[in-house]
Amino acid sequence: MISIQQREQLHSQIWKMAGEVRGAVDGWDFKQFVLGMLFYRFLSEHFAAYVDEGNEGGTPYADMSDEDIPEASRVVLIVQKGYFIAPSQLFKNVARDAAKDKDLNIHLREIFDAIEGSAVGYPSEPDLKGLFADFDTTSTRLGTSVEEKNRRLCAVMLGVAALDFGTFEESQIDLFGDAYEFLISNYAANAGKSGGEFFTPSHVSKLIAELALHGQARVNKIYDPACGSGSLLLQARRLFEEDRIQDGFYGQEVNLTTYNLARMNMFLHGINYDKFNIQLGDTLLDPKHLEEKPFDAIVSNPPYSISWVGAEDPTLINDERFAPAGVLAPRSKADFAFILHAVNHLSARGRAAVVCFPGIFYRGGAEQKIRKYLVDSNYIECVISLPPNLFYGTSIAVNILTLSKHKADARIRFIDASGEDFFRKETNNNVLTDEHIAHIVELFASSEDVPHVARWVDLKEIEEQDYNLSVSSYIEAEDIREEVDITELNARIQQTVAHIDALRSDIDTIITELEA
């Protein structure tokens, strides 16, 4: 119930903030201001709490003056946390005077520049650089005058300040991810799904993380090759003890905005700068983590059927990621390019769990050849069909593909988890509850077939099906039509006919009497 209350409070507060700036700030920009302010608040609180923990019984950091912090302490804090925030720059102190600060927009810009600038020359510099780039407090999008900018910034700041969740780590919801989803769904629908991108809801992220790490007591590191705002990586962080993922969290993202969100999310969830490595760039054409591979756990929801250069660049067929398949993913559908990338980066003991568009499992051409390569190499572990309408912006019933390089036998597990027993209907989207997720994971791990739900299929049968990997091709849907007893039905029909004949006879008799 606490999580529900927190979520309702968050949505209510965002709605209130929107009311303060509605008509002046575009939905996409409003999203950036809210998320940026949330990040600023919790980055401040996390930093102050860290200092106070090491200064037990002393003056709270927020009550100190900037001059009270020796340069040596400042350097130590940057080395340990990756950045520095002076007491006067803390969200709490700025919000207190925000309503009467005539230069609020300028002061916020200076603070953000100072936070990023504090890391210059330190190992954390690449993790802080450009972190607030999308939070432009001087933008004309906030208003044409300084007064308008400050009024709207103040409204957002005080709205974020009013949220009462305790510390960020104690929040019962993925506050940042939930805020992002709510903002996308209400204020930035079109922008949020550009280029085949769909925000991964927390419940789907949880399922993917559970599948990727199932049965692995420890993994070296976890990787998302198209990480977006980092929700899949964070679910792994929330689900498992910190020491289970030994060497940290890795990801790559091509979109600058979501790249910044992913880095923010790492900091917000207590993942220190030396425990994550999020890179900006095109995963397919400019992969960034070649030195860090292989990975024991890979999670991914790559953009659905996005276009890429494909065969127009003949050199790509020589890329170690794509060469083994002997063919490149189609130019208009890069799905299998991401899957082959994941296979290449997967360790010999690990597992990848990837959200997939259903069409890639049955289409012919290059996609069929890639499926053949994956099946013949015995890399495909399981194909799971999920319920429709799980993602905001699309009703498509997606699949999850799990991949492994250490399979014990030459079979593939197919699971039909699309029925009403596997989701809860809500107003806008269907939802996987914890019970539904546990059920799917249990089916995934089981050695038993379940009629109409789960089945092990030999590779020979898949070969006979021309490497079709659609779940519906191997699992027969349950016939829920009511069975009819033909003998009983005929008897009832005969009774009805006899009754009608009797009525007709009675009517004929009455008519004859009336005519006499």
Image: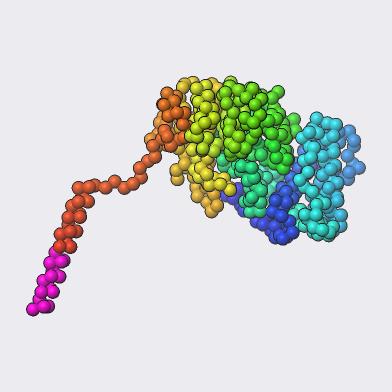
Q: Residue furthest left?
A: 516
Q: Residue furthest right?
A: 67
Examine the rendered structure and indicate whether residue 350 appears above or below residue 251.
above
The quarter of the rendered structure image containing the C terminus is bottom left
Residue at the image point whose x is 78% and y is 55% from the top? 142
Residue at the image point whose x is 69% and y is 29% from the top? 287
User: Which residue occupies the foreground of this view, 516 or 218?
Assistant: 516
In the displayed structure image, the side of residue 479 where residue 139 appears, left or right = right
Examine the rendered structure and indicate whether residue 342 appears above or below residue 189.
above
Residue 33 percent across, percent down from the top left: 74, 50
Whether residue 508 is in magenta: the answer is: yes
In the displayed structure image, the side of residue 437 where residue 146 appears, left or right = right
Q: How many marks?
A: 0
In the displayed structure image, the side of residue 505 where residue 237 appears, left or right = right
Q: Quadrant of residue 46?
A: top right
Q: Is residue 54 visible?
A: no
User: Which residue occupies the foreground of this view, 374 or 25?
Assistant: 374
- Colour style of the rendered protein structure: rainbow
Residue 217 percent across, percent down from the top left: 58, 26
Whether residue 511 is in magenta: the answer is: yes
User: Which residue occupies the foreground of this view, 232 or 29?
Assistant: 29
Residue at the image point whose x is 74% and y is 30% from the top? 274
Residue at the image point whose x is 19% and y is 59% from the top? 496
Residue 230 percent across, percent down from the top left: 66, 38
- Main SS class of the magenta portion in the image: helix
Residue 472 percent across, percent down from the top left: 43, 37
Q: Quadrant of residue 128?
A: top right
Region of the chain picked out in magenta, as a range:
502-516
In the displayed structure image, the side of residue 427 where residue 482 appears, left or right = left
